[in-house]
Structure formats: C-alpha cells, structure tokens
Amino acid sequence: MPSNIQDDKCVRCGACLSQCPVYGVTLKERFSPRGRNFLLKTGKVKPRDRLVRETIKACLQCGACSAVCTSGADVSSLIRNERASHGFFRTLPVQVYNLFASEMMSMLCARVGGMLGPMPTPAEKPFLSNAAWWAGRYCSRAEQLGNKKALPRVAIFAGCAQNMLYPEIPGKIAAIAGNRLVVPAEQTCCGLPAFSAGAFRQAKKVVLRNIEAFEPEEFDILLTGCASCASMIKKWPLLFEQDSAEKKAAEDIASRVMEFSCFALEFLKPSRVTASGKLCLQMPCHQRFGYGQADAPLLFLRAFWDGNFQDRVLGCCGQGGLFGFTTPDLSLKILEQALAGIEPDVQAVCTTCSGCLMRLKQAMSSPAWTGRQIKAMHLVDVIIPD
C-alpha cells in the first residue's frame, strides 16, 4: 500500500501556489498545498475539525504541487494517506468505490451520477462489448493515416468513461492500431477515483482485475486515449507489497502504457487535416503532471492540424475524477477560470482526458456557451472526425 510520508519536507517557499487550481480560485492559504501540509503535520488542530475536513476534501489530486516542489514534499500522497486512515476526510463512503469494479458501469452512471450531479447518457453500444463494430466505423480514414514504422502489438485500455460514454474514442484508436489488437472485455476502471480517495483496498481490487485481464495477453503497448488512465496505470505498483508477484505484474504493465498523442507521434506519419476553424488545447493535469508528457499534445497538433490553433493552452478543468461532482462550487470556479482563456475566434477545444472531455462538453452545451458554438472533442477527433 502507498506508504505514509513521515518527514515534513515542505520549506514553505510557495512555489506550489501558482500551480494549485484550488488555491488559484480561493486565494486562501489553508487551501494551498503548503497550507494543507501544515494542517496535517501540526498537532495543533483537532483531527475532526470542520475547517480541516473541508480543506482536505478540497483537493483535486492533480499532482501539480508534488511535480513542482524542489524539496520533495508530496502533499498529494499525504492527503491520500490521511483519507485512507480517516474516513472523516473522504467525500464519499468507501463502499461507493466498489462500483468501479463492477461490470455494470451503466449502474454506476445512474447511481453515482444521479447522486452527485448530471452525467452524460451512457452510449447504446459500449466499446468493450462492441470493439470490432466501433473500429470498423473508422477503418477507411485510419488506413489513410499511414505509419512511420510497423505497428507493434497493441492492447487497448478503454477506461470506464470512454467505454460507456464516449466509445467512439477507443473505436477510432482501435481502428488506427489495426489488426494486431488486444481488447480484453474483462478490463475495468483504472482505479483513479478510489486511489485518489484513499480507498486503497477498492483500488487494489480494481487493479487486480485489470492485471488478470491483461497479463495473459501478448502485447507491446498498452494504449489508452485517456491521460488520467495512463497516469493511474503508472501508479498501479504503489498498491502492492514490495517484491510481490502482483507488484511485478503491475510494474510490467505500467512500463508499457502509452497515451494516444505519444503513440501517434511515434508511429503515425503526419497526415495534416485542413480546417478553417481555430483550435484550442485544454491540457489535463494528469497529462502534464501524472503521465508527464505535456509536450505531446502540442506536438501532435503541429504535426496533424493544418489550421490555426491558440497558443495559450487552457489549464485544469476542475473535474479531478469525482471532485467535480462532490465539490461543485470550487470545481465550477476552476472551470470558469480555464474557459476564460478561450480566444473569441476559437471554434473547437480538444483534450486528452475523458473526465476533462465530459467537463468541456457539459460547459459548451450550457446557456453561457451555446451562442459561441464551440465544439469539445478528443485529440483523436482531429485526425478522424465524426
């Protein structure tokens, strides 16, 4: 299990302040990473204090603070461990995260979505049970892209949101990957919602199910269209004991994960899509800080998009797994701050994360934005339009 962080490495320098989305909209020190660190490390506060609970719950688990800290303070891990040790700091009962191991993701959307807020309607044909059908819809365009080199054996990790809500995304990616494709139907959620909540036992259960689904298969790359899934898969080994067989299996699979834009840059020949509209990129936190490949989506657009795109990249969307549902007021402020960076002539905004895409689609369909007629889409939609 993720180990507790005993040493207070934070030197209170404030480098994290400009990176934390929650602090950026509240400007309250207790919501900053160094403020949270102080609250949890000092013995001067009651562990069940209301303000402390509110502060610890209001963390996106984006990893921005840990990524920029020159002292090695990992406040994200500290908060996860506090959530694991004290249910008081969890936003939802731990039993909710058992649903992410269930095959009934439609049930999850109905139960959790109805409890926490509006959710998109699940697709009639989920990807995992209709993988060949979805891939077949896009084969002709995928064949036009061409390859820089022979494609390796590819396994598709769909993730729960893309499987149930946006199956066209893994469908397009599957069409690009071609015949040497592995799509285990038994795969499930990557485990990020449970892991972020400190529900480590539930996260471990989900990850073990994925290991059982992928371990017998032969593949070189575990390809996913969701940067958050890619980031979480890299963390799978943290859930298991050192030198255990499960940890070794998790490390093996994690070493092969690849987010779509990185895959396209390495294996696809640039096939520029001509468009008259202007495109804007929203950079998911997990693409930048978790998976650690912030340059890839920008390089992808420069290679494949033959239209204008906005130089300024949009930041955090405020979704953060279930954060957007459980902390809606803060989440909306973070989203509005990001959307304020869209230039007037932008006609489409794209992203590499399922949660960010859901957030952007909901925003673009709201009364405040419908007049602008801005389309929210995934990066793969740039080269394989609907």
Image (cartoon, rainbow, N blue to C red):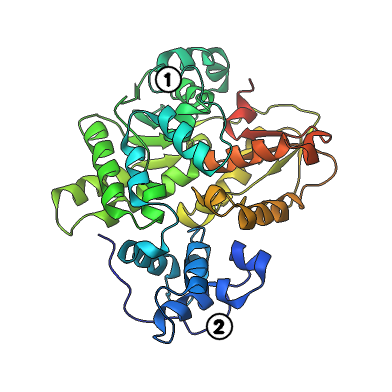
Identify residue for label 2: 13
- Residue in view at x 43 percent, y 49 percent: 231
Q: Which residue is drawn at 41% across and 55% down?
A: 196
Does residue 5 appear left or right of residue 173 in this picture? left
On the image, the x and y values in percent for residue 189 come to 37, 38
Is residue 69 visible in this depiction of the protein? Answer: no
**Above-or-below relation of 107 to 140:** below
Where is residue 363? Give x, y as percent.
69, 40
Alpha-carbon span between mark 2 and mark 1: 50 Å
Which residue occupies the foreground of this view, 164 or 94?
Answer: 94
Q: At label 1, which amino acid type do we have?
A: Gly
What secondary structure is marked by label 1? loop
Residue 379 rendering spot, x and y as whole percentages: 60, 35
Q: Are circles 2 and 1 on residues that touch, CB within 8 Å?
A: no
Residue pictured at 42% horizontal, 52% vertical: 92
Pointer 1 local density, CA inside 10 Å: few below 14, some 14–19, many at least 20 = some
Q: How many neighbours does mark 2 have within 10 angstroms: few (below 14), some (14-19), or many (20 or more)?
A: few
Amino acid at circle 2: Cys
Number of the front mark, 2 or 1: 2
Asked whether residue 5 is in view, the answer is yes
Looking at the figure, which quarter contains the N terminus? bottom left
Determine whether 12 is above or below 85 in the image. below
The residue located at (85%, 44%) in the rendering is 344
Q: Going by the image, does 213 lie left or right of 75?
A: left
Q: Quadrant of the C terminus?
A: top right
Report the front residue among 155 and 55.
Answer: 55
Instruction: Identify whether 273 is placed above or below 91.
Output: above
Query: How many numbered marks, from 0 up?
Result: 2
Q: Can you identify the residue that label 1 sits on?
A: 178
